[in-house]
Amino acid sequence: MEIVIADTPDAVAGIAADILAGYARKGATLGLATGSTPLKTYQELIRRHQAGELSFAHCHAYLLDEYVGLSREHEQSYYRTIRTELTDHIDIADENVHSPDGTTGNPMQAARDYDALIAASGGVDVQVLGIGTDGHIGFNEPGSSLSSRTRLKTLHPQTVTDNARFFGGDEDAVPFHVITQGLGTIMEAGHLLMIVTGAAKAEAVAAFVEGPVAAICPASILQFHQRATVIVDQDAAAQLQHSEYYRYALDHKPEGQDF
Ligand code: GLP
């Protein structure tokens, strides 16, 4: 993994946007995440698009996860969220923006279908990831199989509490079933781009970067990926034991090496 410690959340967003812009220029397949963390990155991509610097016309996009039981028009469905926060403001074709279908009567089948759709498309080139305070990526909660495929999951009570802020603070309004790409599915993306900001994530960052690979901390599976870039701000990096080394390694990166 390459650990990039940036000064501020804005700096994190700038670095992440640079990486994603490089993929967009190649007409790549982008893996998108929801949650509050990538919003600054998406705003920067929108800014570059509106400034005429960046086109997504040849890109496809796949979302990580979706709530079960929210209509696609519900403002907190991830189907709607990614359109509101990113894709409605750039020139990607709407039919090229895919997400798991949480509205069918058979979410288990919808999950399998989504996994197959990603594979049939040729896979994701770069996957944006955030992390939950419990170490989840997508909605792969602690205990998730490290080789899991896209499937139906039950949210951890901590995640329900964390996400209630998007539902007017009402935990009862947060669906407790979701469809998420599995850890095995996520690991098939060519490049994983993890973005983390804020002190509330410092413990989770230290656990997945420097702790053991274990299902109790699903994000730790990134340690097995050949190309994972982890961009954190100072607050999120606060509990890393080797932060000085990560800075040093970045400053002394061999020329021509991606990381
Ligand atoms: C959510 C999403 C994840 C996201 C994470 C962190 O529940 N399913 O994809 O990365 O939790 O969210 P936030 O960035 O808002 O802290």
Image (spheres, rainbow, N blue to C red):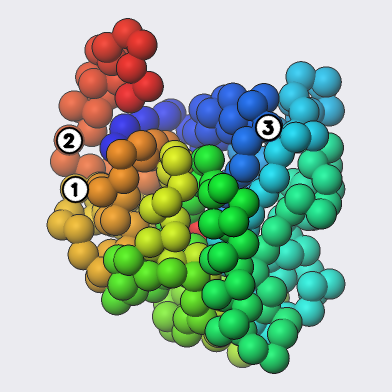
| Observer able to see residue 40 | no
Q: Is residue 255 above or below residue 215?
A: above
**Residue 255 appears left or right of 37:** left
Residue 40 is situated, as x and y percent measured from the top left of the image, at 63, 40
**Disc 3 from disc 1: Cα separation:** 34 Å
The residue located at (63%, 78%) in the rendering is 110
Q: Earlier in the sequence, mark 3 or mark 1?
A: 3
| Residue 71 or residue 126, whichever sits in front | 126
Q: Earlier in the sequence, mark 1 or mark 2?
A: 1
Q: Confirm or deny contact between disc 3 and disc 2 (CB under 8 A).
A: no
Q: Earlier in the sequence, mark 3 or mark 2?
A: 3
The C terminus lies in quadrant: top left
Task: Name the front one of labels 3 and 1.
Answer: 3
Q: Is residue 108 above or below residue 135?
A: below
Mark 2, residue position: 242
Residue 141 is situated, as x and y percent measured from the top left of the image, at 39, 73
The residue located at (67%, 63%) in the rendering is 99
| Residue 138 or residue 246, whichever sits in front | 138
The residue located at (26%, 48%) in the rendering is 224
Q: Is residue 147 above or below residue 96?
A: below
Mark 3, residue position: 27
Label 2 Cα neighbours within 10 Å, binned few <14 / some 14-19 / many ≥20: some
The residue located at (39%, 62%) in the rendering is 183
**Residue 96 appears left or right of 112:** right
Q: Amino acid at mark 3?
A: Gly
Residue 210 is tagged as: 1
Badge 1 residue CB within 8 Å of ligand 1: no
> At numbered mark 2, what does the secondary structure look like: helix, strand or loop?
loop
Residue 194 is tagged as: none
Task: Name the front one of labels 3 and 2.
Answer: 3
**Residue 202 appears left or right of 70:** left
Residue 5 is situated, as x and y percent measured from the top left of the image, at 36, 31
